[in-house]
Image (tube, rainbow, N blue to C red):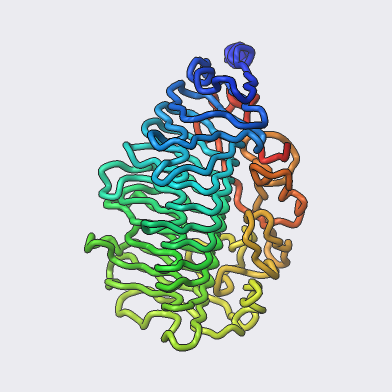
């Protein structure tokens, strides 16, 4: 078998493309496993990518531009496509940057999206499996940042991964989400930093299938102009170890969107939440025997807006939540959510690690930070947030940014479109959980290994 792998690697090409050349035609003429390397400068869109298992990558300075109003910048109609280290925007109103129209196992990694007039990354035309959106910077958007699945559930994004992205600023004529996953779509939303959105920073609509669980873990979500910051419109979903600063509609809100009856199998556990205008944590249509859990959360409500937590509901597990004031944490106003007066919560829940990826005690400390977390929370990629190593149980997590090799499973953190490296914080960053932005199987990883970009500055 290895002779076949060696032969395949020998035929994989890396084709450099200068600004002004037809990169789209070269990508569509590429063979399985080839990579098209866009050199620094402006590369004209639009482009429809139809060749499977081809990588198009840049170094953060490759700017894909399209000023028209008749197409998206990049449409994808093939499986296994990888976009990495590219810079998109601005675009006109309603013009998406990357739209997945068909295909599975598609990756958008380490790209910059700025001033996008439509959706930055969309997969809402047909079913998709294994879409991975990792390590991207979405900045100053004029529409929703990430949109997966169809609103009515007629198409779904299954087994997606949205991880380690930075979304900073959404002002829209529509709702203006940071990211949303529609009915019957499911996967992982982990270690993202989302700030200053018009609608919810994160919205999960849930699924009609009990086995299709979405995990929302380790995110730092700040504010919403019009809504709650983290909204759960339906389960099954696990919301754990997040730090949430409330918006107009509250911090974390679980509610029954459209009367679908999907407030079941919702677990909200081990979060730290500050309420602004609206309750820190709110739930509606919760009832007994529906698999609902609200446990081990620390919540503080600014004065004048009522209690931070919902009242007890008969038959619903609402264990060890703390309705506290700012003294719960060392200094939440400056972003220090280390436990100050928080006690030990209830054990038995699936809470192995905390916001920083540090192993928790059993039973855990209430809230998102177990111990020795960051003293501030900058609006930056999460691996730039300073988490200490901690004491107590052994920290068994692995940073995704250890800078020890060039494997595709360990992307570094450089802001595309900039020469400034977030790796200046190397060694002190948050112990984020390992993510794998390959996801297409062992052989695809072998074939593509020669051509993955990293967020390294040019």
Q: Is residue 143 above or below residue 68?
A: below
Q: Residue at x 50, y 31 (%)?
A: 440
Q: Is residue 357 above or below residue 115?
A: below
Q: Tell me the quarter of the picture where residue 295 sits.
A: bottom left
Q: Is residue 422 above or below residue 107?
A: below
Q: Residue at x 55, y 74 (%)?
A: 366
User: Residue 380: in sight, yes or no?
Assistant: yes
Q: Is 456 placed left or right of 26 in the picture?
A: right
Q: Residue at x 59, y 63 (%)?
A: 354
Q: Quadrant of the N terminus?
A: top right
Q: Is 60 placed left or right of 161 in the picture?
A: right
User: Residue 453: in sight, yes or no?
Assistant: no
Q: Residue at x 49, y 87 (%)?
A: 303
- For the residue pair 344 and 50, the one nearer the viewer reads as 50
The percent position of residue 23, horizontal first and vertical second, equals 55, 22
The percent position of residue 4, horizontal first and vertical second, equals 58, 12
- For the residue pair 87 and 122, the one nearer the viewer reads as 87
Q: Tell me the quarter of the picture where residue 193 sits.
A: bottom right
Q: Quadrant of the C terminus?
A: top right
The percent position of residue 262, horizontal first and vertical second, equals 28, 60
- For the residue pair 272 and 246, the one nearer the viewer reads as 246
Q: Residue furthest bottom?
A: 304
The percent position of residue 107, horizontal first and vertical second, equals 51, 36
- For the residue pair 144 and 316, the one nearer the viewer reads as 144
Q: Residue furthest front?
A: 68
Total marks placed: 0
Q: Is residue 182 above or below residue 70?
A: below
Q: Tell me the quarter of the picture where residue 325 sits.
A: bottom right
């Amino acid at each position: 078998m290895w002779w076949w792998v060696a032969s395949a690697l020998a035929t994989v090409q890396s084709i450099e493309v200068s600004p002004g050349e037809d990169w789209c035609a070269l990508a569509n003429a590429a063979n399985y496993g080839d990579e098209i390397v866009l050199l620094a400068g402006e590369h004209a869109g639009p482009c429809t990518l139809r060749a499977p298992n081809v990588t198009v990558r840049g170094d953060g300075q490759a700017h894909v531009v399209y000023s028209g109003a008749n197409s998206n910048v990049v449409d994808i109609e093939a499986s296994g496509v990888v976009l990495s280290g590219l810079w998109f925007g601005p675009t006109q109103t309603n013009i998406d940057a990357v739209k997945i129209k068909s295909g599975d196992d598609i990756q958008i990694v380490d790209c910059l999206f700025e001033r996008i007039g439509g959706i930055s990354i969309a997969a809402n035309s047909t079913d998709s499996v294994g879409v991975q959106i990792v390590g991207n910077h979405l900045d100053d958007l004029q529409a929703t940042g990430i949109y997966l699945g169809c609103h009515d559930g007629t198409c779904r994004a299954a087994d997606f991964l949205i991880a380690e992205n930075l979304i900073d600023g959404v002002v829209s004529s529509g709702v203006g989400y940071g990211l949303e996953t529609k009915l019957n779509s499911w996967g992982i939303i982990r270690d993202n930093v989302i700030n200053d959105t018009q609608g919810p920073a994160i919205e999960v609509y849930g699924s009609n299938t009990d086995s299709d669980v979405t995990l929302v873990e380790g995110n730092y979500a700040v504010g919403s102009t019009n809504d709650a910051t983290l909204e759960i419109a339906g389960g099954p979903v696990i919301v754990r170890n997040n730090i949430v600063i409330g918006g107009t509609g509250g911090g974390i809100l679980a509610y029954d969107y459209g009367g679908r009856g999907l407030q079941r199998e919702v677990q909200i556990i081990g979060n730290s939440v500050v309420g602004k205008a609206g309750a820190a944590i709110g739930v509606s249509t919760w009832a007994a025997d529906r698999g609902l859990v609200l446990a081990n959360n620390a919540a503080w409500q600014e004065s004048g807006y009522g209690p931070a937590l919902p009242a007890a509901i008969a038959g619903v597990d609402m264990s060890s939540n703390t309705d506290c004031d700012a003294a719960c944490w060392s200094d939440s106003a400056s972003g220090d959510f280390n436990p100050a007066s928080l006690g030990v919560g209830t054990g038995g829940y699936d809470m192995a690690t905390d916001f920083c990826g540090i192993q928790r005690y059993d039973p855990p400390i209430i809230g998102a930070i177990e111990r020795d977390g960051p003293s501030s929370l900058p609006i930056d990629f999460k691996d730039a947030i300073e988490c200490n190593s901690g004491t107590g149980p052994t920290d068994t997590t692995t940073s995704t940014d250890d800078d020890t090799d060039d494997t595709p499973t360990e992307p570094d953190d450089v802001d595309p479109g900039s020469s400034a490296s977030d790796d200046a914080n190397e060694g002190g960053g948050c112990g984020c959980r390992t993510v794998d932005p390959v996801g297409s199987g062992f052989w695809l990883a072998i074939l593509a290994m020669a051509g993955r970009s990293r967020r390294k500055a040019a």
